[in-house]
Amino acid sequence: MKKTLLLLFLCTFFLSFSQVNSSALYDIEIEGIDGGIIDLNLYKGKKILFVNVASECGFTNQYEGLQELYTTYKENLVVIGLPCNQFRGQEPGTAAEIQTFCRLNYGVDFPMSVKIAVKGDAQHPLYQWLTKKEKNGKKNSSVKWNFQKYLIDENGTLMDVFYSITKPMSKKITKLL
């Protein structure tokens, strides 16, 4: 009897560590580039691709692929662009300048945030969730460069992380949609 209780306790104990409150993701507030709030609760039931973006990066042309991905899979996916100036100052613009650049050059109409920190002491709560296993339940990661992508499933669970070299319309991503 004691062994059974001990086994039950240990199973419960270890399961509690593997359980992640995915609703915590949906509670994170993100300031939109247009001045509003990006409410992640609106995207429950859809996959979300979070991408840290920059206007003066060698990967900036991925905006085109991100827009194509968003347009093609809009029923089941939302792409959210998160401008960041932490990698060699490659996103120096204001919110208005970033928004204009993206719309005029790439036709971007997916949600975008104001500039945020994706690493370091000022790391945005979203990126704390995305990069820390204790929050996302799947893995630790670090943001290596602009246009790193985090794919979340319909239930708010981290599916995978794709580095900058992975193009938005690559099979690595589209096969998961």
Image (tube, grey):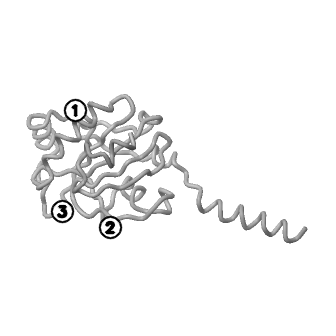
**Disc 2 residue type (three-letter):** Asp
Q: Is residue 131 left or right of residue 62?
A: right
**Label 2 residue SS:** loop
Disc 3: CA contacts within 10 A as few (<14), some (14-19) or many (>=20): some
Give how far across and how far down residue 103 sits, in percent. 13, 35
Q: Which is nearer the N-term, disc 2 or disc 1?
A: 1
Disc 2: CA contacts within 10 A as few (<14), some (14-19) or many (>=20): few
Q: Nearer the viewer, residue 33 or 81?
A: 81
Closer to viewer: mark 3 or mark 2: 3
Identify the image quadrant of residue 86. bottom left
Residue furthest right in the image:
1
Q: Is residue 92 left or right of residue 72?
A: left
Give how far across and how far down residue 99 sits, in percent. 15, 39
**Disc 1 residue type (three-letter):** Asp
Q: Residue at x 22, y 56 (%)?
A: 165
Residue at the disc numbered 2: 121
**Label 3 residue SS:** loop
Q: Which is nearer the N-term, disc 1 or disc 3?
A: 3
> Vertical placement of 99 versus 162: above or below?
above
Residue at the disc numbered 3: 87
**Label 1 residue SS:** loop
Disc 1: CA contacts within 10 A as few (<14), some (14-19) or many (>=20): some
Residue at the disc numbered 1: 109
Which quadrant, please, contains the N terminus?
bottom right
Which quadrant, please, contains the C terminus?
top left
Q: Which mark is residue 80?
A: none
Give how far across and how far down residue 20 sits, in percent. 55, 54
Closer to viewer: mark 2 or mark 1: 1
Would you say the residues marked 2 and 1 are in contact, meaning their CB atoms lie under 8 Å apart? no
**Disc 3 residue type (three-letter):** Phe
Give how far across and how far down residue 57 sits, in percent. 12, 55
